Image (cartoon, rainbow, N blue to C red):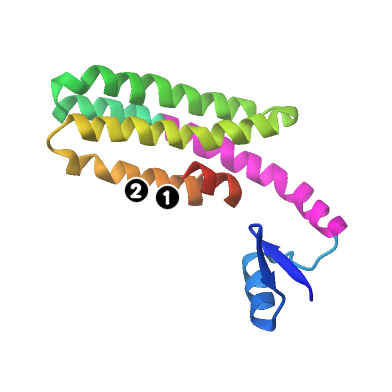
Amino acid sequence: MAYYSLHKIPMKATLSNKALLHFLNPLYGETDQVKAEFDEWYKPYKTVQIRSVTILTALLYVVYSQINQSFAPVTIHPFMTLLHLNVLPSSLLLIALLTLWKKLHLLNNILLAVAPVGAAIGSIYIIAEINEFAIYLPELYLIVIWTFSISGLRLVYAAVSA
């Protein structure tokens, strides 16, 4: 009886499971050489995506930090400025810079997975400190969407990060 693993969960290789595996992974059943060739072909595109997205997100956090100043409670301004103007844009720009060196690919993926965690923790702190939290709650949803759909992280890294 053959077992296949999808995200390390053993599954019996039935026709419907094979169809699901093919749907989730178009390279399912391909040789290791084909998978390696695909990874090599895809790396430059993924690198450009990560670089572009992190630079754009850093710029959006700078804009966001300025918008916050107009309606956020004064008591939370110093933390919001630290987080949205300094920490998050700096870390995102560092990630973008690291994409220039292939040797730092693993470190880059780890930092890319940690960045949304820091953003979410900061956002939760802000929400806990203010009375009108509904305006900041969507930031948590956007962080999750960014992590899974936009960041360029592999599903394993995104799932751990989220």
Residue 89 in percent (x, y) is at 43, 25
**Can residue 13 be seen by looking at this rendering?**
yes
Residue 60 in sight from this viewpoint: no
Classify 10 Å Cα crowding around label 1: few (below 14), some (14-19), many (20 and above).
Answer: few
Give the overall secondary structure of the magenta segment: helix
Image x and y of residue 27, in percent: 74, 64
Q: What stretch is highlighted in magenta?
A: 32-58
Q: Residue at x 57, y 29 (%)?
A: 96
User: Given contact means CB atoms under 8 Å apart, are the residues at marks 2 and 1 in contact?
Assistant: yes
Q: Which residue lies furthest to the front in this view?
A: 1
The x, y position of residue 125, in whole percent, is 28, 30
Q: Quadrant of the N terminus?
A: bottom right
- Asked if the stretch drawn in magenta spans residue 161, the answer is no
* Dot 2: element: helix
- Return the residue at label 2: 141
SS under mark 1: helix
In the displayed structure, would residue 84 be above or below residue 49? above
Q: Which of 56 and 35 is in front in this view?
A: 35
Is 76 on the left-hand or right-hand side of 160?
left
